[in-house]
Amino acid sequence: MTPSWIALIVLAIAAAGFVLARSRALRAAAREGRRLHSLPGYYGWTAALYAALPALLLLAIWLVAQPAVTRMMVWPVLEAEASANAVPSLMMADVQRLAAGLDAAVETGRLSREAARDLPAGEMRAAMAAQGVALGSEVTSATRDAALRWRRLAGVGHLARTIAVIGLALAGAAWGVSRAAPDFRARNAVERAMRGTLISAALIAILTTVGIVLALIFNTIEFFRLYPASEFFFGTTWSPSFGGGSELGILPLLWGTLYISLIALLVAVPIGLFAAIYLAEYAHRNVRSWAKPMLEMLAGIPTIVYGLFALLTVGPLLVEAFGRGGYLGLGWMQGGTAVMTAGLVMGIMLVPFVSSLSDDIINAVPQSLRDGSLGLGATRSETIRQVVLPAALPGIVGAILLAASRAIGETMIVVLGAGAAARLSMNPFDAMTTVTAKIVSQLTGDADFSSPEALVAFALGMTLFVITLALNVVALWIVRRYREQYE
């Protein structure tokens, strides 16, 4: 039985437990002539939570643990052959695809269970091709035996999972229904369960972040065991080669990242700040009610759309203006992909980040400061320049730093608008690339993750993580200091 069907059955059991527990509590109160401690719905929710939460938690743990346990039990079949091939991960992937293909062939009626179990290794590749399953290597006897063991263990695991999860749900529902009595503090039990659920959700978010950071750290350490850290951080050439002899200097990538982000901020900060000042200080309430949502719609456009806009519209327009055959005749730009192309489009994307945050900061400035300035005879523009903006400056700086961290982490606009050349150049009309674009390119394809050329993506990611984390910490520190001063 699939996990989705199991989850639906668990929810149905929880719903039945809700109805039974609620009706049992009402009957007990009527029979004993006593008032219920809690509202009737709380007794139902107690049984529903006892049925659903432990069962769904067990299902989630089982879904994570079963593949790992199955892989560990199947690996001894492949161990002898893996020592010669030295690509155990690819072999195990073929085993899983082969097992899935056999299951699909049995379900569609192409093979019987007996035929799937007795199919020779030489005929399995053709049978998998008929199912649309692509294998990375020939099917050997060891691969065949491992796939059959995988199917057998997976079948046992699926059956055990179904019985355990549904059984736990039934037991929880029965336990919740049995506790539905007038003196049972059902509301307290529900509140404890909900508090535990919320704490668990918060812990999952924290542990996910910790897991991502640990994955970056361990793979970065592994990379620096294979490639010198001094050449990575101070090298000026980026030339990966999976055949060997790579030069993996990060400086050209950092330069491209910072250069494009700088141009984006030069576009986004003035436009976003002026828009925020207008919306906060000059716009009528009716104008603000539609202008601000329209401006913030820019933040909801997918970045791939911005990238296509840069590639198909902004790039050709810049070439017509600054290219060799352009109407300015400057010859500065050789192609549509350039730092300027990506920077302009990214700046447009960042406008709502700067404007929305700055608008909130400006509106947070106490009205008494404005009234005092106007009362002393200052005009509205003088009040904005000399009172409002200085008071809001720490918050505006924090908004700009948050927008900068967003620009540094952008990928799709850079991939489509800036090109793929890793170079150190001051010309904004040259094609360059960034750290995020190279992370994508290094992990694209059938890369061997034990090589420096693949592990370098984690070192790049760790570097980018440290930079953006520092920017975010500085921005939040500035904003918090601002709030402490003016609220």
Image (spheres, rainbow, N blue to C red):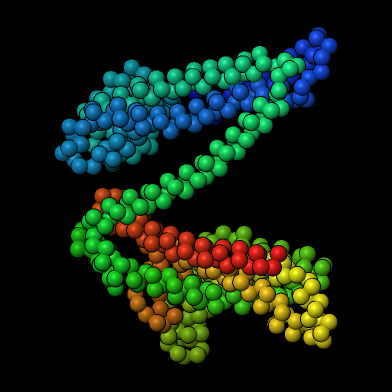
Residue 350: where, in percent of width, then height? 58, 68
Residue 198: where, in percent of width, then height? 60, 38
Query: In front here: 289 or 469?
Result: 469
484 relative position to 167: left or right: right
Q: In which quarter of the image is residue 257?
A: bottom left
Q: Can residue 350 be seen in this view?
A: no
From what the image shows, is residue 312 above or below residue 459?
below
Residue 317: where, in percent of width, then height? 53, 79
223 relative position to 30: left or right: left
- Kindly identify the residue that appears in the image at 43 percent across and 59 percent down: 465
Q: Quadrant of residue 231?
A: bottom left
Query: In front here: 442 or 323?
Result: 442
- Kindly identify the residue that appears in the image at 38 percent across and 31 percent down: 67
Task: Report the residue that reaches farthest toward the front.
Answer: 485
From what the image shows, is residue 451 above or below residue 91?
below
Q: How many labels does the image show?
A: 0
130 relative position to 6: left or right: left
Residue 471: where, in percent of width, then height? 49, 65
